[in-house]
Structure formats: C-alpha cells, structure tokens
Amino acid sequence: MKLLFENWRQYLDEVEDFSDITNDQGEIQQSLDYFYKDHAPSKGTRSEAGQLFGYSVVRFDLEGGDVFYFLVDNKDIPKAYVALSPLEDGMQVGNVRKTKGDFYITDLYKWLIDQHNVLYSDTKQTTAGQRIWSKLREDPELSVEETDLSGNPWKAIKMSDIEPLKLPKYDPETRKRFHRQQSQKRRLAVHIQQRLRRAKDREK
C-alpha cells in the first residue's frame, strides 16, 4: 500500500505547489470585487455569456486572447472568477477566486471545457487548486492527463471529444492489441482509485 501511494504521488507532485492565498471569505470577496469592478474593465471588453448555476456569466476578452470569467448574482456581486490564457490547443487556468456558495468550482471548470474544448491547469497550484484537479481526474466524463509542456500542466478534455484511434482495416491483430491495452489501463486506474478510497476510509 505504501508503494501504491508513492507511485500515485508521483503524478500529483508533478505540478509545483503554491501557497494558499487566503480562506477568509471577506478577503476573497474584496479580491473578487476588485477584479470585477476595477481590474477586468480596465483590461478588456465586457460581454454577457449566459446563465450558469443561477448566476449571470460575465466575460471580459483581453488583448492576446486572455479571458476573464465571472459568476455574478442578481445584485451584480461577483461570486467566482477564473482567468484563462491561451495555451496550445486550449486555455490555461490562471487566477481563480470563489466564495462559498451553492455550486462547485469543478462544475465551473467543466463548463469552461465545454466553452474552450481543452483546459490546462496552472503549473503552480494552491492546495485548493490541487483538490480541484484531483476531482476532475476522477470525473468519468473527462479525460485528464499530464502533459510534457513546460511545468507539466494537466490537460482536461471531454471523453466524448476524444477521437477513436483509426487503425488500418487490414490489421485486426493490431486493433485487438490496442483495445486490450486500453482496457488494461482503465482497469488499473479504477483499481488504484478503489484502493486509495478504501485506504482513506480506514484512516477515518
């Protein structure tokens, strides 16, 4: 079991740790207010991007392709903020803020994946950021893999967007071998997650 945890940690520790900013809800709200009312309007163009979790989605588009997203209540008070920057074939998460509320930040990330197809993690993560990506890796609707880009960020896409490997029709043995390998990988991933959960349950 110790070896299992050590091997699993090799994946979790690829992205550099980053100290938490604050857990104080008042300070988080002050930060959100600043980014929404002062910083974002001075940097980009505002547009309305629909509704999500009962909040208005406000988007600011900046030069260079950066995008700021805010979830705002009916009193025009921001409750969440995510800054994105272009990276390869998708967008990379940068600054993130969220007050305690009635939605999960992971669901907001999944919505961002719907909007941009590919979402990369930051290369420096707070404890909260690490938890977010840990939960995304467990989501059966997503494929989340470590990349070989600078800083080894995680890359998340929807499983439904993964194109099946096109193998030559005249090579059935190669096709069978590929599917066996994929099946073994999936079973191993499920087995590791089950053992980790059982180990955590015993620690409670």
Image (spheres, rainbow, N blue to C red):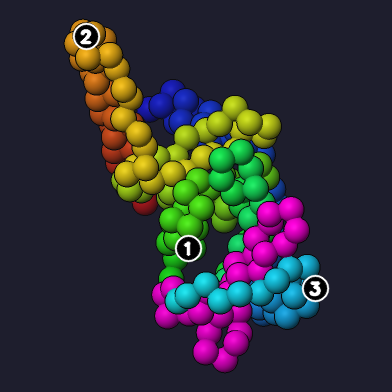
Start-end of magenta stretch: 52-78
Q: Position of residue 167 (x, y in %)?
A: 29, 17
Q: How far is mark 3 from mark 2, CA to CA?
A: 59 Å
Is the N terminus in the top left, top right, bottom left or bottom right quadrant? top left
Which residue is pictured at 21% across the width and 9% down the height? 170
Residue type at mark 2: give it. Answer: Tyr
Q: How far is mark 2 from mark 1, CA to CA?
A: 44 Å
Label 3 close to label 2 by CB (< 8 Å): no
Using the rendered view, name the quadrant where residue 63 is placed: bottom right
Residue type at mark 3: give it. Answer: Ser
Q: Which mark is residue 108?
A: 1
Q: How far is mark 1 from mark 3, CA to CA?
A: 24 Å
> Does residue 94 show up magenta in the picture?
no
Above or below, 67 against 171 in this view is below
Going from the N terminus, do you reach mark 1 or mark 3 first? 3
Viewer-side label of 1, 3: 3
Q: Position of residue 113 (x, y in %)?
A: 47, 53
Q: Nearer the viewer, residue 95 or 193?
A: 95
Q: Which residue is mark 3?
A: 42
Which residue is pictured at 60% across the width and 87% down the height? 76
Q: Nearer the viewer, residue 173 or 144?
A: 173
Q: Which residue is mark 2?
A: 170
- Tell me the crowding category of disc 2: few under 14, some 14 to 19, or many 20 or more residues within 10 angstroms, Cα based: few
Going from the N terminus, do you reach mark 2 or mark 1 first? 1
Q: Nearer the viewer, residue 72 or 97?
A: 72
- Tell me the crowding category of disc 1: few under 14, some 14 to 19, or many 20 or more residues within 10 angstroms, Cα based: some
Q: Position of residue 197 (x, y in %)?
A: 33, 43
Viewer-side label of 2, 1: 2
Q: Position of residue 106 (x, y in %)?
A: 46, 58
Going from the N terminus, do you reach mark 3 or mark 2 first? 3
Question: Is residue 166 something one can see in this rendering?
Answer: yes
